[in-house]
Amino acid sequence: MDDAQPQPPLEEPALAEPVLLPPRGLWALALVLFVLTAVAGILWAPPLHPRVLPSLVLETWRDVDLPAMRQRDDALLRLVAPSPEQQALERTIQAQFKVYLQREAELGGHTADDAAARLALGAVEESVRTLVQRWGVDALRRLAVQFGRDVHRAVETAVLAARAAHQPLALHLQAQPLPADVSALTALAGALGTSLERTGIERQVRDGKLDPVAGQVVETIAQARFLQLGARVPGGAPQLASDAWFLVQHFRVEAHVGLDLQRRLALLDELTMTDPAYPSDYARGVLLAREDEFAKAIPWFERASTHGPFARQARDNARWCRERAAAGRP
């Protein structure tokens, strides 16, 4: 009898997972179908249009040589009155003008039919005529620059105080009793403070102070108001320098919120005649589009799209206006 050891039972082989193999040629067919689908998607997909980005922002009034304007005004301020007599007359002019401005503030700017206002204005105009005849027009310009600087500071103070009180400047100017900053502005500038409020100057605050170019607009408007006191000067009242005049005109057309469309368009016509470089076609399109006059704005944008620095934006604006006009919606 053999001593052989019993053999261990044979293990059954593990079952393998079935592998499904595609029929021959199926991969190639799937690839062809994928390519055909992609091509069809490209050929029959609706055309893609670039997104139209309209812009109705117009701020050429900011494109001024502000340092040059400031330097010119600074030079006038350095022209100190050389004689006690001239200094005395300048103080008289300032006092007389203050009397008139107080009356103007009381009447809300409507002084044409008021005898007291006309008398006060006549007195200061006579004093200004004497000043210019004896010491030249720069003496008047210096007083106008000083008046502009003072009004700038007073307006900025009132604007910032209104923002701190979380109220519009218009309400701040009408508060009762009047805040100290409003009283100071009214005493200095009369009804001019209210006129400046109507321009929307409070919208021009940047980094907690009035934007420098907007501040120059305020100064220039105030200077123009003071220079009108030279109405009795031989040859008429002195005019603003051309760059200062253009600054105010550009601002009135583009940013003055208190003017209606017809007034803006009239000012634009005047500006176009005196400043051929002004982008009048584009500006007219912007003004019309702002008032939802899309159909009327289209031809002006189309004209502007052929020339000038706003040509590309004019094309986008024209297309946007066509879409709005076709949809019949604002």
Image (cartoon, rainbow, N blue to C red):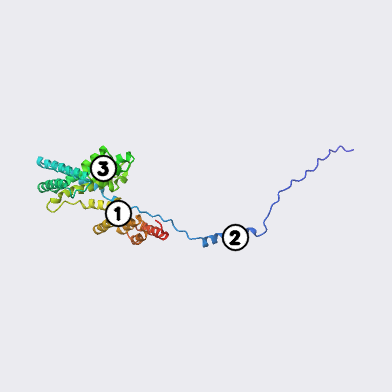
Q: Which residue is mark 1?
A: 260
* Relative depth, front residue between 271 and 175: 175
Mark 1 Cα-neighbour bin, 10 Å: few <14, some 14–19, many ≥20: few
| Quadrant hosting residue 174 | top left
Expressed as whole percent of the image width and height from the top left, the position of residue 141 reads 17, 47
| Quadrant hosting residue 21 | bottom right
Relative height, residue 215 to residue 54 (above, below): above
Q: If you read the primary sequence from the N terminus, does the residue marked by circle 1 or circle 2 appear first?
A: 2
What amino acid type is highlighted by mark number 1? Asp
What amino acid type is highlighted by mark number 3? Val
* Relative depth, front residue between 76 and 118: 118
Q: Which residue is mark 3?
A: 155
Q: Nearer the viewer, mark 1 or mark 3?
A: 1
> Which element carries disc 1, helix, strand or loop?
loop
Question: Does residue 254 appear left or right of residue 78 in this picture?
Answer: right
Question: Does residue 174 appear left or right of residue 318 in this picture?
Answer: left
Expressed as whole percent of the image width and height from the top left, the position of residue 22 reads 67, 56
Q: Quote the CA–CA distance across marks 1 and 3.
A: 24 Å
Q: Nearer the viewer, mark 3 or mark 2?
A: 3
* Relative depth, front residue between 291 and 65: 291
What amino acid type is highlighted by mark number 2? Leu
Residue at the image position 23 percent from the left and 42 percent from the top = 186
Question: Does residue 241 appear left or right of residue 326 in this picture?
Answer: left
> Which element carries disc 3, helix, strand or loop?
helix
The dot on residue 33 is 2
Residue at the image position 35 percent from the left and 60 percent from the top = 296
Mark 2 Cα-neighbour bin, 10 Å: few <14, some 14–19, many ≥20: few
